[in-house]
Image (cartoon, coloured by chain):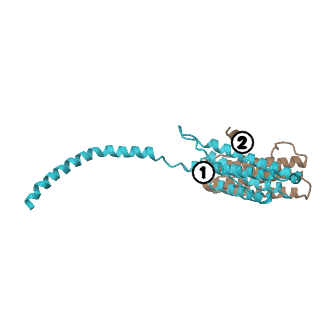
Chain colours: A brown, B cyan
Amino acid sequence: MTNAGGPVIAALQGALAAEQAASYGYGIVGAHLRQRSAMQADATDDWVAHLRASDQLAKLISARGGTPTPAAVVYQLPFQVSTPAQATALAATLEDRVAQAYLGVVALTETGLRGFGAEQVRAAALRAEAWRGSTQPFPGLPPTSLRR
Amino acid sequence: MSTGAAPADAAHGAVSRRALLAASAALPLLLTACKGVQALGTPPPPAPDIVALRSAIYAEHTMVARYAAVLVLLRSQPPAGSTPQDLALVTAVSAVQAEHTAHLAQLKSRLVQPAGSAPSPTPAPTVHVTGTVAAQLTALEQAEQAASDRLIGQLAGLPASLAQLFASIAASEATHVPFLQAAGQGQ
């Protein structure tokens, strides 16, 4: 990932990297869900959503004079996936990471980008809730960032 | 008539000059005093981020109170209605209320009170609920969506860390909508 172009490009590149990782991860998720099931259809929908978000981010980066970093060929999974339950857990984890990356965009001062980032945090949290079946009080925020 | 008027005017003019000199000497003192009184009497208006933070804190207080009222309604259901679905609904509503309590705590921790001032007590909103459980769940879902949209609408101009907290809470509140819908199925 290149940080050339300052904090705006860096935040957008961070979100792009998370979207690319999620796109790859959903391939693994879909492969471990029952073929032609409703869950597999949901995984396909979410995979498409991440591909579209990647395209949008690439355009935003290019429009600001940056060069979108290409996706990696392969990504290391956070844990082994060999069952449908592990696949849904992976989908939720991918969405958590996407939400966290978009909070970097929310930190920017440009109003339009901040709103875009917040909408994407919300979209990722909604997908995570659908996979996990439960909610989280602070999607995307690491526990260390919360005050006691 | 004109001859009598001239000395009187001259005397009046002399007094006026003395008064003017005294007044001009006192003017800076008067201005300083006025400035001092103004500085003490009119505190500056709170910054926009403080206004947004206080608004968010009040909104979370209200949400916690609404969930508490719905929990009272749920627990007042006759024992015959305490099916596994009812119990699961109580658990779900309690879980969401706990998240609102966590939101409230984080928001309050960001509100820095000026030195020497007592924390301004937030009046606890009084919430009464009537009607069916299903109607109350629908109302909660609408309130959650509205709260999420409102927080995202307040992001402009906030400090970065507060904007991130608002965005995260907005996302959490949006997830309460499908969560409550799933928990309330069969009501």
Q: Is residue B116 left or right of residue B59?
A: left
Q: Is residue B81 left or right of residue A128?
A: right
- Kind of element beneath mark 2: loop
Residue B22 placement (x, y as % from top left)? 24, 45
Residue A12 placement (x, y as % from top left)? 67, 51
The amino acid type of the residue labelled 2 equals Pro
- Determine the residue positioned at 31% across, 44% down: B28
Where, by quadrant of the figure, is residue B30 drawn? top left
Which is more toward the observer, A89 or A113?
Answer: A89
The amino acid type of the residue labelled 1 equals Ala
Which is more toward the observer, B48 or A141?
Answer: B48
Q: How many marks?
A: 2
Residue B96 placement (x, y as % from top left)? 76, 49
- Determine the residue positioned at 81% across, 52% down: B76
The residue where tag 2 is placed is A142
Which is more toward the observer, A105 or B121?
Answer: B121
